[in-house]
C-alpha cells in the first residue's frame, strides 16, 4: 500500500467523513441497507450467497450460526448511522471499502464494522464484525465470532 493509501486508511479510522470518493461511501451504505433488509427478513442465505468468496471461505459454519443467532436476538435493524469509512486500494487484493456504523435493532443496538471487496459487479461483503452489543432487555455484551482467520 502506498503512502496515500495508508493515509486514507488512517484518516478513515479517525474522521467521520473518511477518505475516498463520496460515491464509494454511498455504495457501501446501500450494501449495508441491503444486508440489513436480509437480516430483517431472516434471509441469512442471501447474505451468504451475496458475500465474497473470501468471506465464505474464511467463515466457519459455527461462526455463521452464531451470527444468525445473535441477529435473531437483536431483531430487525431499524436504522444505522455511519461512524467512519475508508477505501484502500492494492494491486494484489483489489479495492476494499470499510465502514463502521452504529445500528439500532428492534431489541438492542450495536456497532457494526463492514469491509467490502469491490468487483466489476459491485461491492461484496468481505468481513463483518459486531461490537458493543447492548440488548434492550438487560445489558449484554457479545461478539458474533465472525472474525478473519489469521
Image: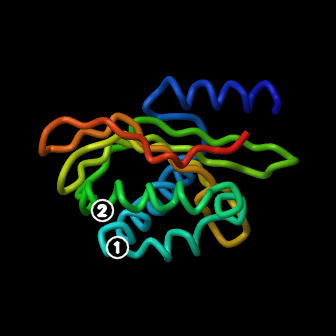
Q: How is the image coloured?
A: rainbow
Cβ–Cβ under 8 Å for marks 2 and 1? yes
Relative image position of residue 67 (x, y in whole percent): 44, 56
Q: Which residue is mark 1?
A: 42
Q: Quadrant of residue 8?
A: top right
Point out the image quarter for the C terminus. Answer: top right
Q: Position of residue 22 (x, y in %)?
A: 52, 47
Residue 72, label in figure: 2
- Please determine whether, in this image, residue 133 is positioned above or below residue 74: above
Please name whichever residue, 19 or 71, is drawn nearer the observer in this view of the structure: 71
51 relative to 26, above or below: below
Quarter-of-image position of residue 110: top left
Q: Is residue 137 left or right of residue 63?
A: left
Neighbor class of circle 2 (other Cα within 10 Å; few <14, some 14-19, many 20+) is some
Query: In the image, is residue 83 above or below residue 35?
Result: above
Image quarter in which the N terminus is found: top right
Residue that protrudes farthest toward the front in the picture: 62
Residue 48 picture location, percent across and down = 55, 70
* Label 2, label 1: how far apart the Cα atoms are: 8 Å
Which one is nearer the viewer's eye here, 128 or 15? Answer: 128
Amino acid at each position: 500500500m502506498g503512502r496515500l493509501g495508508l493515509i486514507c486508511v488512517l484518516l478513515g479510522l479517525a474522521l467521520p467523513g473518511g477518505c475516498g470518493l463520496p460515491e464509494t461511501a454511498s455504495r457501501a451504505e446501500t450494501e449495508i441497507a441491503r444486508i440489513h433488509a436480509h437480516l430483517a427478513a431472516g434471509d441469512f442465505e442471501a447474505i451468504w450467497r451475496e458475500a465474497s468468496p473470501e468471506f465464505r471461505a474464511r467463515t466457519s459454519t459455527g461462526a455463521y450460526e452464531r451470527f444468525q443467532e445473535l441477529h435473531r436476538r437483536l431483531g430487525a435493524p431499524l436504522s444505522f448511522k455511519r461512524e467512519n469509512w475508508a477505501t484502500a486500494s492494492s494491486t494484489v487484493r483489489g479495492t476494499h471499502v470499510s465502514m463502521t456504523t452504529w445500528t439500532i435493532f428492534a431489541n438492542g443496538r450495536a456497532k457494526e464494522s463492514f469491509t467490502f471487496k469491490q468487483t466489476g459487479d459491485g461491492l461484496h461483503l468481505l468481513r463483518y464484525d459486531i461490537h458493543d452489543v447492548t440488548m434492550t432487555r438487560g445489558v449484554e455484551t457479545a461478539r458474533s465470532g465472525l472474525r478473519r482467520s489469521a
